[in-house]
Image (cartoon, grey):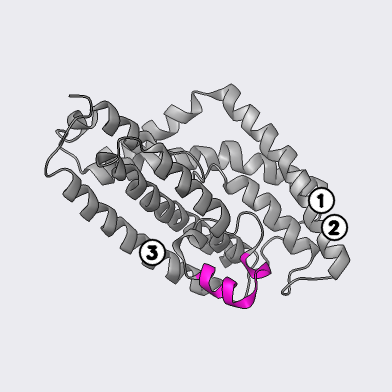
């Protein structure tokens, strides 16, 4: 267990090294937060409310999504794929620690840093500029924290599967790009899933990508179906982590280093 804790710390230290990149990211996320907030406010002023969402809900959603971008690594995470392509993964496989477990620990360290360094500042700015909706019940904060932990687990599980595909693909960037598009469009990042037609919202709610973004936001806003999100997140985390492990074991039965 100590090894995984140290790996999580290493993940934190690795990303905390790039301080200027962090500051630039905070600035960018904040600017886009104001732009997205303006669009949603204009839409809600026109129609009044959408699927029970009012202006305060939409503004809170906007700033939470801006804070979750890097926390769940919505785009372009390719650490494992790059090591597969270079052949460095052969060294990783010889270490006396579970391969998937070590990367999950590192990812939790990365996520923890991104939550405080890239996620919290834009949300605080949004809370100062707008009247955001905070949880009414104290227990919601605990449930929200649990939902965040599960969101990273599901996100990592999907990213792990995509990265492991590099064992068979000569160029993993195509799969990574498709994964980014799916995560952006199906997670509730662009607009709340509740804004979609009822049949589409029902479908998206039960897909794994909704566990990235929409799940923790609905928990934070104390939406009626918030408790069901934790069940969905848990199920998807278990299923996808298991699927990734099976895929990884199949990939490493015979390792071929590309280029020789």
Residue at screen point 84% across, 69% down: 47
Q: In which quarter of the image is residue 175?
A: top left
214 lies left or right of 110: right
Q: Provide the major secondary structure of the magenta segment.
A: helix
Q: Which of 249 and 6 is in front in this view?
A: 249
Q: Mark 2 points at which residue?
A: 42
Binning the other alpha carbons within 10 Å of mark 2 as few (below 14), some (14 to 19) or many (20 upward) gives few
Image height of 56 relative to 71, above or below: below
80 lies left or right of 120: left
Binning the other alpha carbons within 10 Å of mark 1 as few (below 14), some (14 to 19) or many (20 upward) gives few
Residue 212 picture location, percent across and down: 50, 56
Image height of 88 relative to 199, above or below: above
- Tell me the CA gap for discs 3 and 2: 35 Å
State the SS at label 1: helix
- Residues marked 3 and 2 touching at CB (< 8 Å): no
Residue 78 picture location, percent across and down: 40, 36
Mark closer to the chain start, 3 or 2: 2
Residue 93 picture location, percent across and down: 17, 36
32 lies left or right of 233: right
């Amino acid at each position: 267990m100590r090894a995984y804790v140290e790996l999580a710390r290493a993940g934190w230290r690795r990303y905390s090294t790039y301080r200027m990149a962090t500051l630039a990211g905070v600035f960018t996320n904040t600017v886009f937060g104001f732009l997205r907030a303006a669009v949603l406010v204009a839409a809600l002023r026109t129609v009044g409310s959408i699927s029970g969402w009012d202006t305060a809900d939409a503004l809170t959603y906007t700033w939470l999504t801006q804070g979750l971008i890097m926390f769940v690594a919505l785009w372009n995470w390719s650490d494992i794929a790059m090591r597969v392509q270079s052949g460095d993964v052969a060294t990783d496989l010889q270490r006396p620690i579970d391969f998937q477990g070590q990367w999950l620990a590192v990812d939790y360290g990365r996520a923890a840093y991104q939550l405080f360094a890239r996620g919290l500042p834009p949300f605080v700015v949004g809370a100062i500029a707008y009247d955001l909706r905070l949880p009414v019940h104290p227990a919601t904060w605990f449930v929200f924290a649990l939902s965040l932990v599960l969101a990273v687990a599901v996100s990592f599980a999907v990213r792990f599967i995509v990265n492991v595909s590099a064992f068979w693909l000569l160029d993993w960037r195509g799969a990574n790009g498709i994964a980014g598009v799916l995560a952006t469009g199906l997670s509730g990042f662009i607009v709340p899933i509740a804004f979609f037609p009822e049949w589409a919202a029902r479908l998206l709610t039960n897909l794994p990508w909704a566990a990235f973004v929409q799940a923790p936001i609905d928990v934070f806003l104390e939406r009626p179906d918030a408790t069901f999100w934790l069940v969905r997140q848990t199920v998807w985390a278990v299923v996808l982590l298991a699927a990734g492990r099976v895929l990884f074991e199949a990939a490493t039965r015979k390792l071929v280093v590309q280029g020789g």
